[in-house]
């Protein structure tokens, strides 16, 4: 919806207390092989606990062992003679049962998962089976029989691995060339243990925050709230300086979410989980723009993209909170209805499903409006040869931003999705929910990074219609939809009450692959997506999201050869002896020099 620049982490070097710090020197380059394109699992915290991974403050080191069979796992956890082990595995072995066995072992120093595009995983969702279970609308005083996914388990493949707390580092690696060191030094021959020197791996990902958000926010500079910005735009411009009901607008909120996640930090491709909804809503905005200019609709359409929804509805809960406090351009009384686009990328010619809330529909006024909304959607769909249907009217809403509006007051609404009940997405909130999963194609000569910057003809048209696309050419630097702890940076050329004016990249010219920037007028605006819990402040809140991300100093991975413990002790002994002799000689030389100086000073005529 808007041109954005991803804020990138800049890693600072640190001294490793176990090894001589020779950063940048030729000695280090000869000893260590630094691993590139690595992404760690980091520590996240909420009001009650911590999740994620971390290393010790000086990094964790272990003998490298590749996990390829059940026998390899037995070697790592029980029979191998060189623990602790740093486990290198293909994604097919990255499962909850395997990881929990490692978590409960003292023989594992860390894990590195090879993230290969060729790896075939039938299904994998490290998220929970009931997303945002405690912060949706269904609870003891609202549809208690629908709470906790008791009637519908929305993500049955969810194994909750992303919500475990691991005491060792876990990294994602982009390729598998790190196995060469293992093959040269650590391979077993006829079942016998390999001999030293052995290939070892060291992972650095020490996290500063511990326990929970209440604790880390009390301590200065150890964690930050997950935050970013919601993005919204209206068909008719709204005076941004007026707040609350002063605008006297009746609006239909057309919504989608902006974020996703995976087990690893800053990897959140979310093609089906998030991007399919974004693209659909952007396409709708593009299609409606010229029509509404010719024939303005009775109600204003409020295109809204919520950020941080994966983490207990950060963006939608903040917008609803601001509406209640009359700190937003409209308030809840302005909202006529909500149409939310959920996961719609796996329809494949099948039906789309219109989900509604059975509790609010017990109100006859709301039910009447919902029926009208559903009939209107069906009417439009029939002209497009799109099949639509409704699930059982007693079924709960799927996880959706709309639920946060219903927590405050009954509002008519529909959530559009490609699933009748449980998700058909087999990779929900995982690193495998990619464009390939949706059978998307790109020009064959593009790298994965170039694919993320590739601008389709549709997005070019969208941009010419003054609706800037999120993937504006030359500005998108990450394939992640993870919310993070810092918002987007938007280059403004001017700001008024009705419009904002943004610099965007122009189309490539004949002589250059980069176009000249120009300023566009748009009704696109940003709104803070920071949980109200951090404004109140109520860090132990049960009403709002309390997710924070730990700060850290160093993210680093490297491999090297390690000698046997006996040789290391011998080397240490020799080193201590050398140090002792050096100190004695230094003392002796210093004493002789002092004696020489004293003698010369006292008897200047004496000749030596």
Image (cartoon, grey):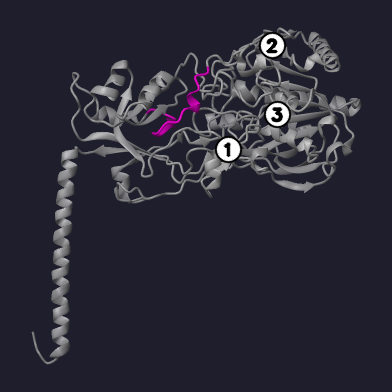
In this view, which residue lies farthest toward the front? Answer: 141
Give the main secondary structure of the magenta stretch: loop
Say which residue label 2 marks: 395
* Image coords of residue 142 (percent x, y): 71, 20
For the residue pair 22 and 81, the one nearer the viewer reads as: 81
- Circle 3 or circle 2, nearest the eye: 2
Determine the secondary structure under disc 2.
loop
Say which residue label 3 marks: 459
Say which residue label 1 marks: 484
Separation of residues labelled 1 and 3 (CA atoms):
26 Å
Q: Would you say the residues marked 3 and 2 are in contact, meaning their CB atoms lie under 8 Å apart? A: no
* Image coords of residue 407 (percent x, y): 73, 26
In this view, which residue lies farthest toward the bottom? Answer: 605
Between discs 1 and 3, the one toward the N terminus: 3
For the residue pair 123 and 223, the one nearer the viewer reads as: 223
**Quadrant hosting residue 525:** top right
* Image coords of residue 113 (percent x, y): 41, 27
- Circle 2 or circle 1, nearest the eye: 2
């Amino acid at each position: 919806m808007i041109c954005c620049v991803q804020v990138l982490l800049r890693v600072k070097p640190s001294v490793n207390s176990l090894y001589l710090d020779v950063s940048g020197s030729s000695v280090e380059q000869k000893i260590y092989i630094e691993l590139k394109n690595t992404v760690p699992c980091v520590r996240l915290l909420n009001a009650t606990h911590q999740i994620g991974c971390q290393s010790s403050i000086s990094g964790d080191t272990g003998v490298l062992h590749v996990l390829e069979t059940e026998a390899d796992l037995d070697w790592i956890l029980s029979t191998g003679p060189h623990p602790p082990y740093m486990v290198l595995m293909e994604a097919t072995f990255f499962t909850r049962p395997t990881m929990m066995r490692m978590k409960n072992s003292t023989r594992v120093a860390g894990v590195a998962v090879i993230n290969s595009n060729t790896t075939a995983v039938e299904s994998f969702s490290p998220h929970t089976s009931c997303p945002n279970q405690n912060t949706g609308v269904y609870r003891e005083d609202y549809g208690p029989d629908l709470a906790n996914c008791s009637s519908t388990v929305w993500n049955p493949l969810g194994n909750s691995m992303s919500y475990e707390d691991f005491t060792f580092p876990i990294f994602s690696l982009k390729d598998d060339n790190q196995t060469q060191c293992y093959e040269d030094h650590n391979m077993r021959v006829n079942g016998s243990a390999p001999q030293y020197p052995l290939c070892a791996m060291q992972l650095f990902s020490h996290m500063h925050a511990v326990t929970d958000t209440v604790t880390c926010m009390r301590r200065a500079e150890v964690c930050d709230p997950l935050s970013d910005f919601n993005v919204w735009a209206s068909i008719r411009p709204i005076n941004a300086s007026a707040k609350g009901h002063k605008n006297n607008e009746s609006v239909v909120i057309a919504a989608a979410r902006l974020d996703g996640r995976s087990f690893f930090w800053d990897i959140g491709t979310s093609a089906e989980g998030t991007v399919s909804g974004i693209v659909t809503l952007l396409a709708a905005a593009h299609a409606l723009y010229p029509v509404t200019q010719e024939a303005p609709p009775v109600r204003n359409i409020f295109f809204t993209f919520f950020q941080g929804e994966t983490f207990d509805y950060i963006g939608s809960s903040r917008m609803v909170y601001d509406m209640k406090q009359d700190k937003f351009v409209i308030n809840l009384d302005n909202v006529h209805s909500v149409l939310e686009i959920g996961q719609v990328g796996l329809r494949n010619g099948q039906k789309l499903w219109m989900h509604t809330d059975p509790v609010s529909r017990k109100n006859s006024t709301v039910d009447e409006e919902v029926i009208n909304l559903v009939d209107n959607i069906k009417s439009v769909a029939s002209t497009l040869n799109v099949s639509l249907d409704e699930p059982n009217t007693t079924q709960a809403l799927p996880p959706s931003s709309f639920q946060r509006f219903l927590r405050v007051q009954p509002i008519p609404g529909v959530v559009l999705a490609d699933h009748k009940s449980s998700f058909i997405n087999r990779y929900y909130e995982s690193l495998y929910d990619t464009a390939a999963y949706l059978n998307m194609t790109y020009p064959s000569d593009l790298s994965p990074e170039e694919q993320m910057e590739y601008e389709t003809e549709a997005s070019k048209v969208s941009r010419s219609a003054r609706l800037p696309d999120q993937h504006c050419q030359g500005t998108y630097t990450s394939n992640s939809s993870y919310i993070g702890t810092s918002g987007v940076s938007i280059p403004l050329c001017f700001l008024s009450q009705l419009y904002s004016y943004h610099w965007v990249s122009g189309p490539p010219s004949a002589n250059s692959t980069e176009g000249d920037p120009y300023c566009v007028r748009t009704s696109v605006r940003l709104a803070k997506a920071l949980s109200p819990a951090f404004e109140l402040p109520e860090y132990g809140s049960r009403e709002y999201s309390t997710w924070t991300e730990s700060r850290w100093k160093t993210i680093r991975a490297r491999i090297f050869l390690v000698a046997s413990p006996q040789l290391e002790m011998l080397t240490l002994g020799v080193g201590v002896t050398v140090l002792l002799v050096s100190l004695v000689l230094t003392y002796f030389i210093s004493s002789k020099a002092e004696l020489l100086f004293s003698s010369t000073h006292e008897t200047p005529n004496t000749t030596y």
